[in-house]
Amino acid sequence: MLSYRHGYHAGNHADVLKHWVQVLCLQYLKQKDKPFYYVDSHAGGGLYDLKSQFAQKTNEAAEGITCLWQQSDQPDVLADYIDAVAQFNPHKLKNYPGSPAIAANLLREGDRLRLVEMHSAEISALQKQFAKDRRVKVIDGDGFQELKALLPPPTRRGLVLMDPPYEMKADYQRVIGAMKENLKRFANGIYLIWYPLINSVAAQRYSDQLRKLPCDKWLDVQLSVARPPQGHGMYGSGIFVVNPPWVLEEQLHSGLDYLVKKLAQDEAAESRILSSENH
């Protein structure tokens, strides 16, 4: 939806989960010399100033990345994610990198990034940030539609992040429809599908629908930071991973308890992982 601006939510608990999983998957792909593509269907602005009026209005980072910053007890499995954020904060925590900035910082010279966005201000921010980066192409368009032309990537290796705002109920079904098409074009790609945990029928049915996608292996990872509210507020988020790296589930188990401890807003905070192996 064209009114959505991620700057209001930058660095919150949902970003922590999403970008931690993103970093783990990118590092896995980098273990082989062969180049790969990173494709972001709803890229956002790339880099967010946590002191801006957008971020300060909600100050959601205070219950997200700030809780993890410069902690001496963090598990090793979170180190690469924290380091990815630290690359943009040489002194104190001031900026939060979105998924495009994190990917660009981690990818190698031969890898490629394709960033799709349709909000004019966010597109301008992306174009300015990556103007001199030959690996990056910023695409003005509907992420659900643009994936058709971007998949499969020429290298036949890649990570696709689908992170729509879900402000419109139709987004849930658009993701399902797009993923069915994506898997026909690029069946062996790694896909990360972020989704909110909120009190709505569409959201509560979503995980079940994702698990029915035509893929052999998946992980469904959820992090709840509070008990569900009476209204429609977000109390957590999930990442659905198609074709997860074989090490990912073990990595997530070793870090999720720490995230629950640090990001909990009440005693109902919890995490869970469902997989195609045990579901």
Image (tube, rainbow, N blue to C red):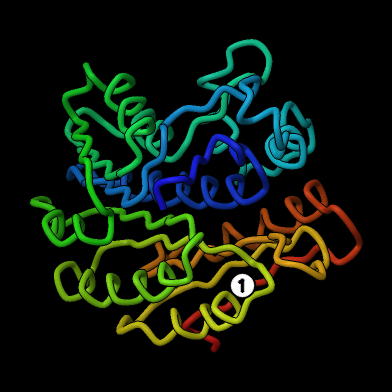
Q: Residue at x 21, y 60 (%)?
A: 145
Image side of residue 159 versus residue 155, left or right: right
Give residue 250's quadrant in the image: bottom right
Looking at the image, residue 178 lies above or below residue 67: below
Q: Give residue 227's position: percent from left, percent from top.
A: 83, 67
Residue at left offset 51%, top offset 59%: 167
Residue 128 point in image, percent of width and height: 30, 19
Badge 1 density bin: few <14, some 14–19, many ≥20, Cα 10 Å: some
Q: Please name the residue shown 71% across and 41% down the image.
A: 64
Left or right, 70 with reference to 90: right
Indicate the quadrant containing the C terminus: top left, top right, bottom left or bottom right. Answer: bottom right
The image shows residue 256 at horizontal and vertical percentages of 69, 57
Which residue reaches farthest top? 91
Q: Secondary structure at mark 1?
A: strand
Q: Residue at 67% across / 71% down in the picture?
A: 272
276 relative to 205 in the view: left or right: left
Between residues 198 and 254, which one lies in front from this camera angle?
198
Query: Which residue of the protein is positioned furthest toward the left in this rendering?
Result: 154
Looking at the image, is 93 positioned above or below residue 139? above
Residue 238 shown left or right of residue 219 in the figure = right
Relative vertical location of residue 221 with respect to residue 10 in this rendering, above or below: below
The image shows residue 147 at horizontal and vertical percentages of 20, 58
Residue, far front: 3
Q: Amino acid at mark 1?
A: Ile
Q: Nearer the viewer, residue 232 or 152?
A: 232
- Which residue does the numbered mark 1 point to in the structure image? 273
Residue 275, above or below 81: below
**Count of numbered tags:** 1
In which image quadrant can residue 245 be found?
bottom left
